[in-house]
Image (cartoon, rainbow, N blue to C red):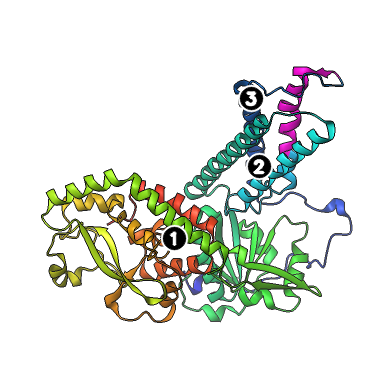
Amino acid sequence: MGYDSFEWPQQQQQPPSNGVPRSAWTRQHRRLSRWHRPYTAALVLLDLISTLAASKIADVSLEKSKSGFQDKSWLFFQGPDLFSFFAYVVLPLGWLLLLWTNGTYDRRYLGLGSEEFKRIVRTSVTVVAAVSLLAFATKTDLSRGTVATVSLCSLLFILLCRVTARQVLHLSRRRTGHGAHRMILVGTLPEALEVYTAVTRSPAAGLIPVAIHITDGYASARGIETPVPVYAGRDVLSLVREVGADTIAVCGSASAEPGELRRLAWQLEGTGVDLVVAPQLTDIAGPRVHIRPIEGLPLLHVEEPTLSGPGWLVKNLLDRVAAAIGLLLISPILAVIAIGIRLSDPGPVIFRQTRVGHDGRTFKVWKFRTMYVDAEERKATLEELNESDGMLFKMKHDPRIFAFGQKLRATSLDELPQLINVLKGEMSLVGPRPLPADDGDYLGDVRRRLLVRPGITGLWQVSGRSDLSWDEAVRLDLYYVDNWSLTYDLSILWRTIWVVLKRKGAY
């Protein structure tokens, strides 16, 4: 779509607003995007069922669950009835109230990211503290086992329901587009296209750009192909109604125009249209960005990546402990695989290759051999068939791989010996993939991958593996380096399980 998609300036259909309408009763309180209303109602119901189920489990499975209530009375409730009232009425409603006050139903956190789950865990701590304080104040000798069982079961059930609800929402967004926001991107064409690329990488995020409103004139995009219609010189509100959008994203330098962003926010008051700002800070995760308002000027403060300190030491310790336990537990599986390789092709079971690791140091990576013993000699004859656009040689149907080796690659079982590298401190469970050392030095952005130890799995692997282009793989690795955290590592390990089961992009 190119020049023909532009429209000439039109007369504004209504005068611009400069603030809240004179009468607050004339404001439109409902937002144009309403997917979160039924979704939130479903979450409230699931949370209520989760807390009721937790109370029922404690009531049925623990003999001392009613201890502390036998000699108590309150209003019309005594003994066991008082326990039932608190277990099935007060406690579930208290959970819902605290979940609401902690923002777990806030639409900004629903459907994406870890903030929703962090707030749920924070709520569970508050519930335990509130119950303990109430028991102390009323001198009620509650069963510690009951409190622990109800709290942990409630937390686990709520988290499980939230994960399930999120998966359903993501499936709906991918397949039907329901539960998504229709966005208009406002800014220069390069900035808008950059934001378009970023938000469309993840359909699960529910952000669907439907139009671009360029601020530097239609001539700047003459003859350029664009994925959505491009407009220039239009009234933004009339364009919102025309394309059925519910969100305006102000991109890059357009957000820096003095007073323009504030006046646009005024115009949108009472219209039900959301306003978001997309600054030119790409691939930086939320925990590293903080807003520091100074005299009405919101400054974005970007923290440095955390590549040292207590969290990094914990990661190193967990890596080695997990590798040692993993090698011990899967040793029978390793033995079976070794036998299968020897029966498939005579030769060594383990393939060791020099790779580049942390700070540019080289090491020998361990893998189960999946190719014939003369694979390296045959590689030269296959170079022209290389399907990778980067440093790694990749072929979907590589003739050097024997049948059993193909199965090992499809299930990623050939990577298991790398637990030895993790145990030796040369690799990590999660990190960028180690690259071959025979490609010379790593210049430019690629070299930044060497700030951390390479990993058995990583963001590259769970986002498409060999199906990704080299540039996209590097971008994902750099994103991991810049935004590493223990929580993020656990998320990647969890996603790795499903990627391996689906066998997507493995060859």
Nearer-N-terminus badge (1/3): 3
The residue under the point 20% across, 50% down is 338
Q: Which mark, by number, is residue 40?
A: 2
Badge 2 density bin: few <14, some 14–19, many ≥20, Cα 10 Å: some
Nearer-N-terminus badge (1/2): 2
Q: Mark 1 or mark 3: which is in front?
A: 3
Picture coordinates of residue 325, whole percent (x, y): 39, 49
Q: Amino acid at mark 2?
A: Thr
Q: Are marks 1 and 3 in contact (CB under 8 Å)?
A: no
What residue is disc 3 on?
56
Q: Is residue 484 visible?
A: no
The residue under the point 63% across, 77% down is 253
The kind of secondary structure element at disc 2 is helix
Picture coordinates of residue 39, whole percent (x, y): 62, 42
Picture coordinates of residue 89, whole percent (x, y): 74, 27
The kind of secondary structure element at disc 1 is helix
Residue 459 to residue 256: above or below: above
Residue stretch in magenta? 76-96
What residue is disc 1 on?
459
Q: Quadrant of residue 369?
A: bottom left
Q: Residue 240 vs residue 506: left or right? A: right
Picture coordinates of residue 108, whole percent (x, y): 66, 54
Q: Is residue 196 visible?
A: yes
Cα distance between the residues tagged 1 and 2: 30 Å
